[in-house]
Image: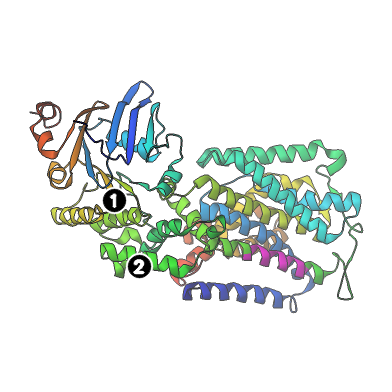
Amino acid sequence: MVAVAPVTLLRTEGLRRAFGGLQAVRGVNLDLAPGEIRAIIGPNGAGKTTLVGMISGRVAPSAGRVLFRGRDITRLPAHDRVMLGIVYTFQIMSIYRALPVFDNLALPVQRRLMRTALDRLALDPRAVARGVEAALERIGLQDAAAQPAGALPYGHQRLLDIAMALALDPEILILDEPTQGLAPDEIARLLGLIRHIASGVTIVLIEHNMQVVLEVAQRVTVMDAGRVLAEGTPAEIEANPDVQRVYLGQ
Amino acid sequence: MTARDRRAAWLHVAVLGGLLALQAVLPPFHHTMVARIMVLAAFAVGYNLLLGYTGLMSLGHAMFFAAGVYGAGLPVYYAGLGAGPAMALGTLAGVVLAALVGLLVLRTSGVAFLIVTMMFAQVFFLAALYFNPITGGDQGLVLTGRLPPVHLLGLELTAASPAVKYNVAWAVLAAGLLVAFGLVRSPAGRVLVAIRENEERTRMLGYNIFAYKWLAFVTAGGIAALAGAAYALLFSYVGATFASILYSIYPLLWTLMGGVGTTLGPLVGTGVMTYVVDVASGVTTSYLLVVGAVLVLLIMRLPAGVMGGVRHRWWRWLP
């Protein structure tokens, strides 16, 4: 019997990264299928953020390759990867607190609308406003457009952060601990949003909250000390003795 | 155009219209003074694109002003070039210099950027002194009588005429404001502010940070050079002073005084500072003490500068 290889959207081959003497990531091979929700878990210092940093282009690998739709993008700058559809949201929430909510969303919206160099100097403001409107609707903050983003309640700021990423029309959305600091009802709302976007977007989710992982992820990659320790469905991972030892501390 | 943009555009038109009308009533001394302020304000308007909108504090902006001064002044002195081509040449010199220097200095940021820009400007300043036989060094060269008059609509225009000084200065300021206002309200302007607020986030929204900073740097350099070219021709003097550190600090000071990140702030700051210096130096030789006192007062009462305070208290829509 010949196993049919699933279509791969993104693949990493032997990715490594050392910071001085510290081996943060030591040879990670990862395959992401289109449309999946992949959770990456592991103890602090396991190399999760460094790994997605290399996928998004924020961190240059010491060795290995990153392939997107079969194309080698290892040397591609981060801002060009965003335009390919690889979008990253920061672990520490990263919005423009001093700017109005409108401008926070207008930035990704206008980036998507810019096609030629001249578009940098002149775009149809109505097209930008329409895009912002749609993005606001998605997170239910239509009335907040004129407020400074920093004045929003914390949970809404987190939603805005993700809405900014979504406005870029991503193919792969990397969420780095999105539930950090959220109240249970806000987590539920966020999970609803994640499930909703997952219909068209591949999601990579770094998460500490196991409840969240078990609830939304289709596949889970467990990292420890810069390596992939295990990979499988949430049920398989829960039952894996290595994972229990390292991650769940049992 | 949104209502906010329209209101801001009208404010700029009103300010420029007011300045244009002012020449009918100003006594001769203030006539020249305001002309000088308008040219220097254009210099500061360009600088504000870097400091106020992109968040880049340069201490080397004098080199672009001086590039305009020399780029326009030397061809007039040595080759009797006309005013129009000299202005164009001066501006071009600043744009080219900013394009090249920008490629190097924008690889740094923060304090390193401050120091590297200052060092490049010092190199320019020392080069101007070194080539003393050509540039006239710190003694400079006087252009009086060397600039051929311009004939326009049957009028003979000379740089010595106060009306020509005033209106050319006004046109330079208007051009500087127009370019700055246009850039700030464009999609690129929004990106510049985003870079100031959070550079990493802006990169991860798909923007090539370097390219946008470079655009701001070259635009600011071009406006500085335009101002420098006009200054040399209108006041008939070319000298190394314009490349000195003092002329890098001036636009920083004027911008801080008038309001960082407001389009009209640099004009207000330049006007206030120039008059404070003038009045104080008429009263005492230690006029810098007065300037210092004014600055301390300003920082205590209006930390965001004059126009920054106005925006904060009354006109939230001020660009």
Q: Which of B90 and B314 is in front in this view?
A: B90
Q: What element carries label 2?
A: helix
> Callout 2 environment at 10 Å: few (<14), some (14 to 19), or many (20+)?
some
Question: Compared to A210, does A223 lie above or below?
Answer: above
Question: Which structural element holds mark 1?
Answer: loop
Q: Earlier in the sequence, mark 2 or mark 1?
A: 2
Which residue is under mark 2? A133
Mark 1 neighbour density, 10 Å: few (under 14) some (14–19) many (20 or more): many
- Residue B58, percent from left and from top: 59, 46
Which residue has dot 1 on it?
Answer: A201
Residue farthest toward the front in the current orientation of the protein = A1
Q: What stretch is highlighted in magenta?
A: B166-178
Residue drawn at (13%, 43%) of the image: A214
Indicate the amino acid at tag 2. Answer: Glu
What chain is tagged by disc 2? Answer: A
Q: Which residue is drawn at 82% across and 42% down?
A: B137
Residue B175 included in the magenta stretch of the image? yes
Answer whether labels 2 and 1 touch (C-beta < 8 Å). no
- Above or below, A75 against B205 in this view is above
Does A140 sit left or right of B169 as displayed? left
Check the picture and name the quadrant holding the C terminus of chain A. Answer: top left
Instruction: Say whether residue A250 is left or right of residue B158.
Output: left
Horizontal and vertical percent position of residue B306: 53, 64
Query: Per the image, is A152 magenta?
Result: no
